[in-house]
């Protein structure tokens, strides 16, 4: 873009007129008017009790549901991350059995609806009334009543975590495969074992690709926990529904839940941005330089 003024042959600066983009102005004005009209319809709707929204916004039952939502989201994401990394490594393994098992797991959990998986785990007692853990070929062990173990919270944590692992495995696999093959070949040339090569060389460099979709998955998980409503997991949506079933303030409680979901999403998005800057391309280059420096640093003996 030109920054220097245009000078006429007489030595006088010629003013440059900025073009007027009337189409952009009209489109922006129209969008603002339509949005304002929709907000006005919602705010002035006589069938909506905004005082009830303010009254239930910090209700104890709502705040307890928010805490459960965060707990389920964090635990399910942790399960998905750990299992997803394991599945991704299995998908890239030379062992054909491990590759096929990982492929089968990913196909199954990506091919069935999440709602079905949640209901399955919650009703596991129909298949296994008692959960038994014992030493093989002996009678030594412990057992639990499945109905007591598989609560709504446990079913939600398992269902969401195992489902996320199938999607996260593909993300990790893509990040691992994006690492320069020269790094892997250099690790092999130095005699590093596959496990050490993956832990020291590949995964630190793959973080730059893995972290952004991981943050997106966690943000999505915050909102996906609303499906826990079907298994009564005492999350935000479940508690909100219990309140509006008793007082019939359906829209007001849905607005309360939506406001809290948007707040949690905004905080998670901010933290995701900080994390991406922390593990950006510059950080990956520092990790690569430090790793290669350690590999080629000569050993000094006394």
Image: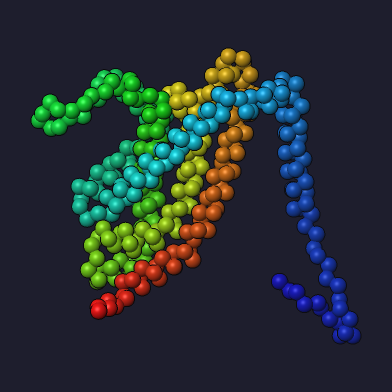
The reply to whether residue 24 is visible in this rendering is: yes
In x, y percent, where is residue 296?
A: 31, 75
Q: Is residue 73 left or right of residue 12?
A: left
Identified at 23% across, 24% down, the residue is: 143
| Quadrant in the picture for residue 257 | top right
Identified at 44% across, 64% down, the residue is: 284
Q: In which quadrant is the N terminus drawn?
A: bottom right
The reply to whether residue 110 is visible in this rendering is: no
The figure's colour scheme reads rainbow
**Total numbered labels placed on residues in the image:** 0
Identified at 49% across, 28% down, the residue is: 235
In x, y percent, where is residue 218?
A: 47, 43
Q: Is residue 179 above or below residue 58?
A: below
Q: In which quadrant is the C terminus drawn?
A: bottom left
Q: Is residue 297 above or below residue 120?
A: below
Of all residues, the one furthest to the front in this rendering is 302
In x, y percent, where is residue 106?
A: 33, 42
Q: Is residue 24 left or right of residue 244?
A: right
In x, y percent, where is residue 221?
A: 47, 38
Of all residues, the one furthest to the bottom in this rendering is 10
Residue placed most toward the observer, 7 or 250: 250
Of all residues, the one furthest to the left in this rendering is 137
Identified at 24% across, 65% down, the residue is: 192
């Amino acid at each position: 873009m030109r920054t220097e003024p245009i000078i006429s042959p007489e030595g006088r600066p010629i003013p440059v007129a900025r073009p007027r983009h009337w189409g952009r102005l009209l489109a922006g004005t129209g969008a603002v008017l339509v949005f304002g009209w929709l907000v006005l319809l919602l705010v002035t709707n006589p069938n909506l009790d905004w005082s009830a929204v303010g009254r239930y916004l910090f209700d104890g039952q709502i705040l307890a549901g928010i805490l459960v939502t965060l707990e389920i989201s964090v635990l399910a994401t942790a399960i998905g991350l750990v299992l997803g990394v394991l599945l991704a490594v299995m998908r890239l393994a030379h062992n054909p059995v491990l590759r096929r098992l990982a492929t089968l797991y990913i196909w199954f959990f990506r091919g069935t609806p999440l709602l079905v998986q949640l209901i399955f785990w919650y009703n596991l007692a129909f298949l296994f009334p008692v959960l038994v853990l014992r030493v093989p070929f002996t009678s030594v062990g412990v057992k639990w009543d499945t109905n007591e173990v598989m609560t709504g919270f446990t079913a939600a944590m398992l269902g969401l975590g195992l489902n996320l692992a199938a999607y996260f495995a593909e993300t990790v696999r893509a990040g691992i495969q994006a690492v320069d093959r020269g790094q892997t070949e250099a690790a092999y040339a130095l005699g590093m074992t596959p496990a050490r090569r993956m832990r020291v060389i590949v995964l630190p460099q793959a973080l730059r690709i893995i972290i952004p979709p991981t943050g997106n998955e966690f943000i999505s998980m915050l909102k996906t926990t609303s499906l826990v409503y079907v298994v009564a997991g005492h999350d935000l949506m479940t508690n909100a529904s219990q309140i509006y079933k008793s007082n019939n303030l359906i829209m007001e409680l849905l607005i309360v839940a939506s406001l809290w979901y948007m707040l949690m999403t905004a905080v998670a998005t901010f933290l995701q941005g900080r994390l991406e800057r922390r593990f950006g391309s510059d950080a990956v280059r520092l990790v690569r330089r430090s790793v290669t420096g350690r590999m080629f640093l000569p050993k000094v003996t006394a």
